[in-house]
Amino acid sequence: MKYNDTWDLEEVFAGGTNSEEVQTKISSIKEDIVHYANQLKEWNREPANDTTALQSILKQQEVIGKGLGQVATFVNMWRDAFMMMNMQVL
């Protein structure tokens, strides 16, 4: 199998690491974290049989983790592409 050696990072977040799209995603993650923190504060472990709140907390944790992973991967790919361009100039 042959893979394309080029990445089009504009398809992920147009405009690079300082773009409005990236900033919007980061703001969304911040809001998710605040919501998550509130869920943790309000969580009452009683009754022990009610797992609805815990499931919601774990779902929110997953959303945050995926969002952070997406942004971090994008920034790392952008940095790698930048480094490759600079190495080609040398």
Image: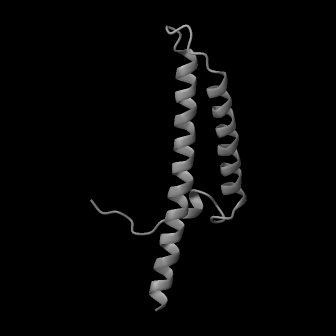
Q: Is residue 59 above or below residue 71?
A: above
Q: Is residue 86 above or below residue 11?
A: below
Frontmost residue, 65 versus 25:
65
Q: Residue at x 52, y 43 (%)?
A: 66
Q: Residue at x 39, y 69 (%)?
A: 5
Frontmost residue, 17 versus 30:
30
Q: Residue at x 54, y 35 (%)?
A: 61
- Residue 84, given in percent of the width and then of the height, sits at 46, 78
> Image quarter for residue 88?
bottom left
Q: Residue at x 52, y 70 (%)?
A: 79
- Residue 53, given in percent of the width and then of the height, sits at 58, 18
Q: Is residue 34 left or right of residue 80?
A: right
Q: Is residue 20 left or right of residue 77?
A: right
Instruction: Give the position of the N terminus as an image quadrant.
Output: bottom left
Q: Is residue 58 above or below residue 76?
A: above
Give the colouring mode of the picture. Answer: one colour
Q: Is residue 26 left or right of residue 5?
A: right
Frontmost residue, 39 versus 41:
41
- Residue 34, given in percent of the width and then of the height, sits at 69, 37
Residue found at the very far bottom of the displayed protein: 90
Figure disc tally: 0
Residue found at the very far left of the displayed protein: 1
